[in-house]
Structures are given as structure tokens and as C-alpha cells.
Image (cartoon, rainbow, N blue to C red):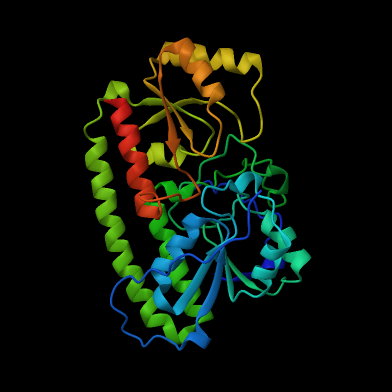
């Protein structure tokens, strides 16, 4: 089943299989491809609420003008520390569909749904149980205590940041098309056509990214990231993450942790330390001063920003450009 109910999504941080923001505003609706099914009248537009702006952009590209999409976490917001407001609760209660990442990243949605009385709103968890994904075991704590019963002893919590691998983002796109078709069967032809067109765009993006990383010397591919968010990205594009500055957002490392990271950066001749725009880079700068590593502190992860980072494709291009430039 693609669609579940919000009430069933509380505590859904899945283990890997072995084989403070203002009220959200609607994002621009993206049209992808040529609609082969007629668009519904405005009264029948599907209201979709996504937990993050990245997910909202993916939904908009698949939904086209048949959907109106908004994000709970606003551009520049931080999903790990997001504090929903009463207006957020009202928004999800009125939605036709909720799109969340799952794997513990945005499981606060379950509590929000309970408060809003929105337990019967259908929800799609885009990262859960994707065929062909080699789920990474997360190093940080995305509410690992809520793993599915009986799985925690065998496998740790899964890293939820799959969308930073374009191939996995395409799997999100397929699931979005399938789910929208279930919610709005009359638009199924449109959704699947849009998904095909958008997947083609992402194929081109993937080729661009691979070509850029082909220019990075092998000896320069060891990096440090702010937290454990770029694991799938690193695996996809041939990087090695030597360590992270923090174990998880909001968890300050001990003096011993910092000393060990500095030693690892020196031993592995790490060229650059990468952080994200929503986090302070004070500690990153301190570590860099001890190691002579370059600091790149303007990467994007789960939140879009101003142009050119106002779309998923723009986010990926921006990140790749910054990373490749630092590793030359």
C-alpha cells in the first residue's frame, strides 16, 4: 500500500533493510510535461501538504496544475527542530494528502496530526520501503527509539536523507505519481506523464553531476560534513566522509570528539569541511583553523532557499558546484 493514515505514521523511523517557523505559504505549482488528461476545475485541485520544501517541489513537478502544494517547514527552515504552530495543524487537517519523508526525519507530523484531529488524512511516506535502495544505518539520532518493534536489535535507524542521491529522488517521484493517482484517479494519466518528463530532467541532472565529479582527483575525495546528512550523496558520487562535526543537529560534540575529528582530518588530508546554511559554522571554523581545511558553509539539505536554490534541481546543482570547486 502506498497510502496510509497519519495516525499510523507516529513513530515510523524504519530500520534499514539488510538486502521555529512561520506559517507555510503555498509553493508555485510546477508543470512538467504535456498533460494528456484534462486538468480539473479549480474546485477539484488536490491540496497537498509536504513536510519540507524539497518534497513540496517534487510533488509540484509531478502534480502540475492539478495540485496545490505547500510546505510545513518553510524555506530556510530546519526539519529536525521544527516547531509546528496551530495554523500548521489547521493546514494538514484540510489537506487531501500529506507527503512526508519518513524514516524518522519528520515524525513530529504524527503528533501534529493528533492535535489537529487529522488522523484520517492520507499520507505517503516517500522514503519508506523503496525497492532497490541500500539503506544506510544512520549515525545520528532521528528519534531512533521509535524504530519498528523488534528491528532495533538487528539494525540501527535508517539514514533518512535519500533525496540527496538523484536516483533515489526519482524513486520519490514514482511514488508521488502513484499516490496522487490513487487520491485523484481522474488525473492519473497526467501524473504519470509528468513523472516521466521530470524523471528525464533528473536523468540529465544526474549526468551533469557525474561529469562534474569526474574532474575531482581521487586523492581529494575525502571530506567532513556538518552532520550525517550526505551519506547517500557521498556513496552516489564517489566521496568518502571521514567524519562529522556533530552527531546530530542540536547535539554539541565533546572536547574529545572535536580533538578526534581534528586528528582524522590531518591524518586523512581532508581538503574541505562542509556545513549547511541553516547551521552556525562557528565550530566548523574553529576546527578548520586547526587543520587548514577549507570551509564551505553554504550547502543545502532538506530546505530550499532563494534562487538558484529554489528547486530540487537547483539545490543539487548548487551543492555540487560548491563541493567540486572546494575539492579541486
In this image, 140 relative to 302: left or right? right
The N terminus - image quarter: bottom right
In this image, 278 relative to 142: left or right? left
60 or 161: which is nearer to us?
60
In this image, 240 relative to 243: left or right? left
Q: Residue shown at 76%/65% (left/top)?
A: 114
Residue 204 position within the rendered picture, expressed as x and y whole percent measured from the top left: 24, 54
167 or 137: which is nearer to us?
167
Q: Residue shown at 21%/32% (left/top)?
A: 215
64 or 163: which is nearer to us?
64
Residue 57 position within the rendered picture, expressed as x and y whole percent measured from the top left: 44, 61
In this image, 131 relative to 25: left or right? left
The C terminus - image quarter: top left
Corner quadrant of residue 31: bottom left
Residue 137 position within the rendered picture, expressed as x and y whole percent measured from the top left: 55, 39
287 or 145: which is nearer to us?
287
Task: Look at the picture and state if 16 lies above or below 65.
Answer: above
Q: Residue shown at 61%/34% (left/top)?
A: 248
Regarding residue 8, the answer to whether it shows in the image is: no
Q: Residue shown at 62%/51% (left/top)?
A: 14
Task: Look at the picture and state if 191 lies above or below 277.
Answer: below
Task: Look at the picture and state if 39 lies above or below 202.
Answer: below
Regarding residue 135, the answer to whether it shows in the image is: yes
Residue 127 position within the rendered picture, expressed as x and y whole percent measured from the top left: 52, 56
Count of numbered labels shown in the rendering = 0
Amino acid at each position: 500500500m502506498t497510502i496510509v493514515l497519519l495516525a499510523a505514521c507516529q513513530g515510523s523511523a524504519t530500520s534499514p533493510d539488510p538486502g521555529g517557523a512561520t506559517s507555510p505559504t503555498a509553493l508555485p505549482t510546477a508543470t512538467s510535461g504535456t498533460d494528456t488528461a484534462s486538468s480539473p476545475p479549480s474546485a477539484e485541485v488536490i491540496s497537498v501538504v509536504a513536510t519540507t520544501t524539497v518534497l513540496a517541489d517534487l510533488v509540484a513537478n509531478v502534480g502540475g496544475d492539478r495540485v496545490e502544494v505547500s510546505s510545513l517547514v518553510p524555506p530556510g527552515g530546519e526539519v529536525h527542530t521544527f516547531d509546528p504552530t496551530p495554523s500548521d495543524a489547521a493546514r494538514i487537517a484540510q489537506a487531501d494528502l500529506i507527503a512526508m519523508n519518513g524514516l524518522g526525519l519528520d515524525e513530529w507530523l504524527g503528533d501534529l496530526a493528533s492535535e489537529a484531529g487529522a488522523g484520517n488524512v492520507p499520507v505517503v511516506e516517500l522514503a519508506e520501503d523503496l525497492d532497490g535502495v541500500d539503506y544506510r544505518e544512520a549515525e545520528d539520532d532521528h528519534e531512533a527509539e521509535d524504530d519498528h518493534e523488534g528491528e532495533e536489535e538487528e539494525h540501527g535507524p535508517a539514514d533518512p536523507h535519500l533525496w540527496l542521491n538523484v536516483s533515489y529522488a526519482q524513486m520519490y517521484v514514482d511514488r508521488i505519481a502513484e499516490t496522487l493517482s490513487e487520491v485523484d484517479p481522474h488525473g492519473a494519466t497526467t501524473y504519470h506523464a509528468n513523472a516521466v518528463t521530470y524523471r528525464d530532467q533528473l536523468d540529465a541532472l544526474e549526468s551533469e553531476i557525474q561529469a562534474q565529479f569526474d574532474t575531482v582527483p581521487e586523492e581529494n575525495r575525502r571530506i567532513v560534513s556538518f552532520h550525517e546528512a550526505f551519506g547517500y550523496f557521498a556513496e552516489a558520487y564517489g566521496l568518502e566522509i571521514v567524519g562529522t562535526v556533530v552527531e546530530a543537529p542540536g547535539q554539541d560534540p565533546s572536547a574529545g570528539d572535536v580533538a578526534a575529528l581534528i586528528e582524522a582530518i590531518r591524518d586523512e588530508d581532508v581538503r574541505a569541511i562542509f556545513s549547511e546554511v541553516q547551521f552556525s559554522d562557528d565550530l566548523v571554523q574553529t576546527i578548520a583553523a586547526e587543520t587548514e581545511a577549507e570551509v564551505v558553509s553554504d550547502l543545502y539539505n532538506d530546505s530550499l532557499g532563494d534562487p538558484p536554490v529554489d528547486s530540487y534541481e537547483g539545490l543539487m546543482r548548487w551543492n555540487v558546484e560548491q563541493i567540486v570547486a572546494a575539492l579541486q
